[in-house]
Image (spheres, rainbow, N blue to C red):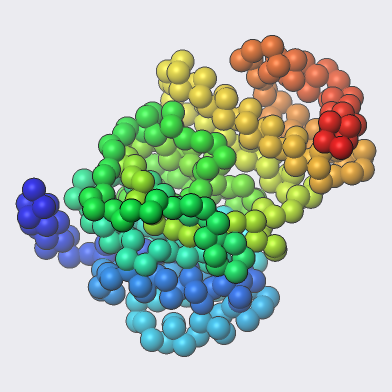
Amino acid sequence: MYISSVICIFAMKSKRNGMDLSIIVPVYNVEKYVRACIESIYRQGIDENRFEVIIVNDGTQDHSMEVIADIIGQHPNISIINQDNLSLSVARNNGIAKAKGLYILMPDSDDLLIDNSLAVLLDKAIETEADIVVANYLRINEEGHIIDSPPIHEETEIEFKEMNGDELLLNLDPNQCHVWRRLYKRSFIIDNQISFVPKINFQDVPFMHECYLKAQKGLVTQHYLYLYRFNRSGAATASFSLEKARSLCTAIAKTWELRKIRDLSPKIMHKMEEDVYITFSLLIYRTLFSITKISGRNQVIDMINEYVPDLRFTHGFRQKLTTFMLKKMPHFYINFYYYYSLVAYK
């Protein structure tokens, strides 16, 4: 079985004569972390002729590009896109537009790939022609120490579960829409015109839901690919503000719109609405614990009603009550919830 898979991969490579993988790394104010990220890419045991690294300098204001200048000089498969600070989502879109690989990986520049973890995923993706491959990850702290508890045994055989797009979506945790733990077939992204919403945070949420709604074949594995630097100070999602609230409202609106892209089954429609409710609940939670002025909280609740005027939650009494208050008495709803949370979480 193993020999036939190797022969199959070799045959596909000889027919293709193209690049297997594009790794897109947006860079903005990560001088403390970016070198380790780029170095981890070159510890994958993959021939450099098989992949390219596209570093998107998103107008970084620190020494991020300087600290990796020598690495860039050592590897001819690295290319640079320089742009003004246009946001992570625009950086990713521009990287995808330039990419030549059969598959795309989009790590964040403050994270790491686990040594020698990528090749098996790439080879399996090429062998099966999957649209998406979903791998596992571990969290690390700011100093790079693992804070999760990985299995104590080593993997002897990596197992993959094949799913169609609907199955992927039904198994998606809306709080786990991490772009960086997945490989994407480039032609799948291009042909389906999937892109990141420009200039917002939380862009992973609509992007991931659209990918799953349009995917034909996905692979899921518990194999560990990635080390995610959890809750880093200075990270895009580490704090919350009115501007971040605006981004999250936009992400909710774009995800809500996806219910209209095709005739969804009742089961998938239910799941989409549940996921939006969970993301909406995140908006309310972050607002309550980060925005202390009444005027600011009122702005947030007005934004969500403006951006998603047809937003309705109907699954159970709590959702129906939330919808009623959101539409009929939005300012009372958010401020009553705020004062209640002060007492409840004292």
Could you tell me if residue 148 is visible in this image?
yes
Residue 321, by quadrant, is: top right
Name the residue located 44 percent from the left edge and 82 percent from the top edge: 72
How many numbered callouts? 0
Q: Quadrant of the C terminus?
A: top right
Which residue is farthest top? 317
Horizontal side of residue 123 vs 319, given as left or right: left
Q: Residue at x 26, y 44 (%)?
A: 159
220 or 196, nearer to the observer: 220
> Which residue is at a point 22% across and 64% down the rendered structure image?
18
The location of residue 23, given as percent across then percent down, is: 40, 64
Horizontal and vertical percent position of residue 340: 87, 28
Closest to the observer: 77 or 289? 289
Q: Which x, y percent locates residue 37?
A: 48, 70
Q: Residue at x 81, y 42 (%)?
A: 289
Q: Residue furthest front?
A: 152
Residue 121 visible: no
Q: Can you give x and y, in whole percent of width and height, for residue 318 in the image?
A: 70, 16
Residue 255 sits above or below residue 227 on the image:
above
Residue 129 located left or right of residue 90: left
Is 32 located above or below residue 276 in the figure?
below
